[in-house]
Image: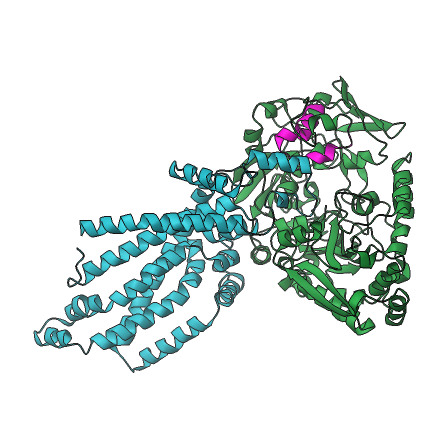
Amino acid sequence: MPTGTRVRWAVVSATSVALVATGCGSSGDSGSGGGSSDTSKTFTYQSSEPQNPLQPANANEVGGGRIVQNLFKGLADYDPSSGKLRMQVADSIDTSDAQTYTVTLKSGWTFHDGTPVTAQSFVDAWNWAANVGNNQINSSWFGDIEGYKDVHPENGSPTTDKMSGLTVQDDTHFTIKLYNKVSYFPYKLGYVAFSPLPEGFFKDPAGYGQKPVGNGPYEFVSWDHNSQVVTKTFANYQGVDKPKNGGVVFKMYTTAEAAYADLQSNNLDVMDQVPPSALANYKNDLGDRAIDAPQGAIQNIGFTLYQPEWQGANTAKVRQGLSMAIDRDTITKTVLQGSRKSATAWVAEGVEGYKSGTCGDFCTYNPDKAKQLIQEGGGVPGNAIKITYNADGGHKEWVDAVCNSIRQATGVNCSGDAKTDFKTARAAITGHQINGLFRTGWVQDYPLNANFLADVYRTGAASNDTGYSSPEFDKLANEADQADSIQDTATGYQKAEEQLALDMPAIPLWYYRTNSGFSTNVQNVEFDSFGNPAWTQVEVKG
Amino acid sequence: MGRYVARRLLQMIPVFLGTVTIIFFMTRMLPGDPAAAMWGDKAADPAQLAAFKHARGLDLSKWQQYLHYMGDLFTGDFGLTMNNRKVIDVIGEALPVTIRLALLAFVFELVVGIGIGLFAGLRRGKAFDKSTLVLTLLLISIPVPVLGFVFQNVFAIQLGWVTPTVQSSTNLGQLILPAVVLGSISLAYVARLTRTSIAENLKADYMRTAVAKGLPRRKVIGTHLLRNSIIPVITFLGTDLGALMGGAIVTEGIFNVQGVGNSLYHAIGRSEGATVSGFVVVLVLVFLFASLLVDLLYAVLDPRIRYA
């Protein structure tokens, strides 16, 4: 998911929110104070009012997303410390051809209302969510499954309400047949949209959206709009991550500043992201309660490759030159106050298949080489570039810094082109109403390199805003999709990524980090690469 | 009097319709597609987007949408938010919070402001008067966010008297700090208006008469001086009450009060036409009634003012 989404919905913070964690080094394994904890006590988490009913396939923004994630559990999820796929309701997801998957469920799982979680619970939930008539924002996630086009036609009404690719064998077995081979399909299954739904849901989807009944580690207690969503630990939770606390209370904050003030005075236990105003001091303020962990998110500058001036074979050199004119290390340290880490590839750190240095010298600051490459490539059209960005996301400072860097290194006139807000900027970018360069980015949907590559750079991909179209890249990506194992897929995509260095459709700038903290009431707080804490592992001091 | 009120109420109808119409078209003309924005940065699935728009009537022409909206409005239906909640429910949650906060701020500026102004006006040129002038000048020149963060830091984080943000919007004790911040600037204006008015009226003929009649000082000041001096203050307070009800985006943000200001701010950010219009409809009504109330108060305070 592109960076904007989350940013936009989250409090007006400059950064986006995503998840996973671990290798978070010294600051990550914070709170190892080792005091005694009380497993019946709840803790509070900074949240924002969900923008949609709490239905699994309808939660694509942080506010609702992180609540739904805790109320529901799908076939698999991602290990918070390694980011690797981890089986939950599924005992196994097997395939021999990467196109037909056989799912075996564990027994014993129930929904919060006591009804069992069966193969039918999954198949019904997916059929319902994919149906265009049910208006689920994430309905297109089911697009790989055979029969999707019947429940989700491009025009008109669905011809059926069941996808032919889903077949229930018995209570604990079902098969998924895909239109094409997608070797990493199980990774997608970790997304919350693929959660099961209880039978009662289908009789009253709207009502269940207000009072969700799931199968996750926490069950829903109450939702005071604009104030809080209260959950409590589900006693019969069968997952591998049994909660070590009594529940999570999601407290709604409209600004990160307010949340930070509450955190400092122990009125809030864990927060999302400290406000930009506190970035310089939060490590001093919080000491060993400060968090600085990597996120699976990247910030890029894209080019309007669909415009004739960027289409010549030599223009790649100009783009590479511009990339080398950006002093990433200095900007991340000064302007961004260490809240980002310089990028060396198009895939974020910590993601399965991440390989550092794919961008090579092209992502290393070198003014002389930059100038030379730009000249060889025929120079920048008009010797001036504009970087389009949204003025409401805290991007102005770094866009100006990048422009300064480019101007000083190469003499190319660079200026920012601010659009009022995120919506307006997006409309201009997708409507091809901009010139030259634009701010872009990507927050992982699932921690696999394919997500950073196929969804952004493949010809015609829904989020391919640059209009990049490379037969070589597409060929390598297709080959990777047909691979037999996820490891082979990841390696295949690494090869495809190398093509990006040659064409430079977008300049990788830096990776996002989670800069957060927690109160003295809790311990063992670790963040994953989605920017979420490992909820169930948080311990509340007794 | 009755006819005057009736006429004023009738005048409200075109004002109300005009405002609602303007706001309706303004919010619908904001750039960007609010439905597509629900997908964030991700390209919206075209089929799903079309289905969603159709379900919400967003695929109709602006005029058709307008007619539907106005029709619904007269039956008391304010429409739905993007996330399918009734706009009236959202208003119902935010408005009471704002009313509590606004009334606290209002009482604060009324009591303290008039008190200080009266005292300073009576002792014109003395130390208290001079320090009032300095203090009010200071309050007027400090931007609200600065005042808010300073108060939050001093009273909540340093002294620990209160929580930094409002934990429960029904707890009046917790609302006091934001109310003081919210009311402080108006307080300065109220104090200055009262002071000037009092100081001027002190020299009026009727004052000399009242004192000459041998009325007790309390009565001279209470019934004669204050009552006559308060009219310009009432004018100010009337419009200020409307402004307070309109919500205070900055103060609500600092103290995490989930009131009208915040709801409106987020609704505008998301181009949620129905929600913005809904709030504005309610606010227009509040403003209209507040100004009617002020005009009626004039007649109560000054018997020379008669409405026919």
Q: How is the image coloured?
A: by chain
Residue A496 is left or right of residue A203, and the answer is right
Q: Residue at x 56, y 26 (%)?
A: A204
- Identify the image quadrant of residue A344: bottom right
Q: Position of residue A79 (x, y in %)?
A: 78, 41
Is residue A142 left or right of A410 when viewed as pictured? left
Query: Majority secondary structure of the magenta segment?
Result: helix
Counting from the top left corner in percent of width and height, residue B302 is at 18, 63
Between B307 and A538, the one lying in front of the other is: B307
Front-most of residues A446 and A2: A2
Per the rendered image, the range of residues in magenta is: A123-145
The residue under the point 46% across, 37% down is B68
Q: Extreme left residue here? A: B213
Res. A63 image quadrant: top right
Residue A227 belongs to the span the image colors magenta: no
Chain corresponding to cyan in the figure:
B
- Residue A117 location, x and y as percent? 69, 24
Left or right of A102? Residue B166 is left
Question: Does residue B197 appear in the picture of this structure?
Answer: yes
Seen from this angle, which residue lies furthest top? A170
Q: How many marks?
A: 0
**Is residue B8 shown left or right of residue A311?**
left
Locate the N terminus of chain A by quadrant.
top right
In magenta stretch: residue A129: yes
In this view, the residue in front, A46 or A474, is A474
Can residue A138 be seen in the rendering of this structure?
no
**The hue in which chain A appears in the rendered picture of the protein:** green
Instruction: Look at the picture and state if A63 lies above or below A318.
Output: above
Quadrant position of the C terminus of chain A in the picture: top right
Percent position of residue A90, x then y: 77, 28
